[in-house]
Image: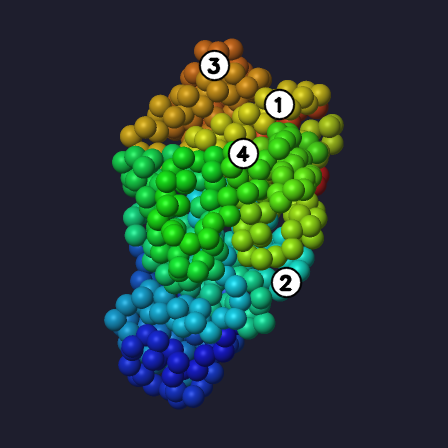
Amino acid sequence: MPVLSVGDVLQATGGRLAIGDPAARITSYSIDTRRLERGAAFFALVGTRTDGHAFVSDAARAGAALAVVSRLPEGTGPFPPAVIHVDDGAAALARCGALARQRLNAKVIALTGSAGKTTTKEFIATGLSASFRVHRTTGNLNNELGVPLTLLACPEDAEMAVIEMGMNGPGQIAFLTRLADPHVGLVTNVRPVHLEFFSSLDEIAAAKGELFAVLRADASAVVNLDDARVRLQAARHDGRRVTFGRSEAADLRAETIADRFLPGAGLSFFFEGRSYAVPLQVGGAHAALDALAAAAAVVAAGAPLPPALAAMSAMEPAPGRGRITRLPGDVAVVDDTYNSNPEALASVLGTLAASAPAGRRVLVMGDMLELGAQAAAFHRAAGERAAASGVALLVAVGPLSKNAAETARKAGVEVHTADDAPAAAKIVPDLVREGDLVVIKGSRGIRLEQVVDALLARAGTGA
């Protein structure tokens, strides 16, 4: 990561040095004292639930070299050896991230989208890692705090940096894109997500499309030709583009997609006169399309494609991102608990329908959040789709999912309901039978990983 001095931070933030030596060096950056390393700069941010200023002394005890505060600490301390007073802590963090970006030698690939962006990010980073030293967004650090922290954490010897960007309102992607200043920009797709904050899909598309609008002139746009809204937004960038999709006009043209959970999805595509086959460790057509988007980003970054595809084929999905676990009794559990939206759920159900387990198709469905006034209708439609997909057992978790339970039950599906994830975790292990294929999917706030943990614990493979 770039080593900054207290003076560098002072200049970047435009703050005032309350105490400390401007020449002192900063070796890491944090907004959480629980993860703070010795020699770090601690940014005391004021949030909706916590105020970082209450933890300045904790930062000092953990070895912080600097605290950046919008309110000078009071009392006897202890305090870090340097303190910079700023007007706005979050803005100060962003300015430091911008300074770190200026000092990076790495080529930056930035991506956003409604669905699949984290899996796509992992595919890109894994593929590039076959030939380069790669830094990537970790966890969910994809917002106005996470992106500058990701930039500040980038090692000085990194050759590629893959930055994921999320949003829940207009203007945020433009802000993050200016901060990351990418050489390659990708919008994976536009889906009915964040409808709590937007009135239409076109508004969501325009907000995601800010990435294309803000790209530097010599950057490359990676464009999903299968998504009409993405195609339209890509016109906001006049520079080079690399396209992908099923369209005959795509640079990377999908030929076949094996839509399956077991043993994993499959993809073949055509590029520059050659066909490539990519077997995957993660299931579903959605994962194959994420891999295709990642391959296009690898091409746009100027990296060799064959070693990247080999690395992508071997990539194991992270927990919550489609990880498949085999349990005794020929039971397979698909952990897709990190997030959910209507189209992502529809894709998963399509894969479930295409699967032929020895036992039943089982869906544990948690509420899909941030859908605004259309939430109940989306959940009713999901119940109908589950029945049409051959789901034999539906466990609906959360108040919104009761709408899905109602329509699925009318269609003849065996249905159980649970008010929340802990309640579901108590009943699901007893409902699963030998040979079942169990897909667990819900929005992050529902915390359905508790159901996954309960199944693994019952099988003796988890805590």
Q: Position of residue 245 (x, y in %)?
A: 53, 37
Q: Residue drawn 46% across and 17% down?
A: 384
What residue is pinned by disc 2? Answer: 132
Question: Considering the numbered disc 1 on the image, is that residue within a helix, a strand or a loop?
Answer: helix
What residue type is disc 4 on? Glu
What residue type is disc 3 on? Arg
Nearest-to-viewer mark from 2 and 3 = 2
Earlier-in-chain disc, 2 versus 3: 2
24 vs 327: above or below: below
Earlier-in-chain disc, 4 versus 3: 4
Nearest-to-viewer mark from 2 and 4 = 4
What residue is pinned by disc 3? Answer: 409
Task: Tell me the distance, in whole angstroms, between the alpha carbons under discs 1 and 2.
Answer: 37 Å
What residue is pinned by disc 1? Answer: 354
Question: Is residue 68 something one can see in this rendering?
Answer: yes
Earlier-in-chain disc, 2 versus 4: 2
Mark 3 residue crowding within 10 angstroms, few (<14) / some (14–19) / many (20+): some
What residue type is disc 1 on? Ala
What residue is pinned by disc 4? Answer: 248
Q: Position of residue 446 (x, y in %)?
A: 45, 38
Marks 3 and 1: CB-CB under 8 Å?
Answer: no
**The one of 110 and 155 positioned closer to us in this rendering:** 110
Q: Residue drawn 50% across and 61% down?
A: 108
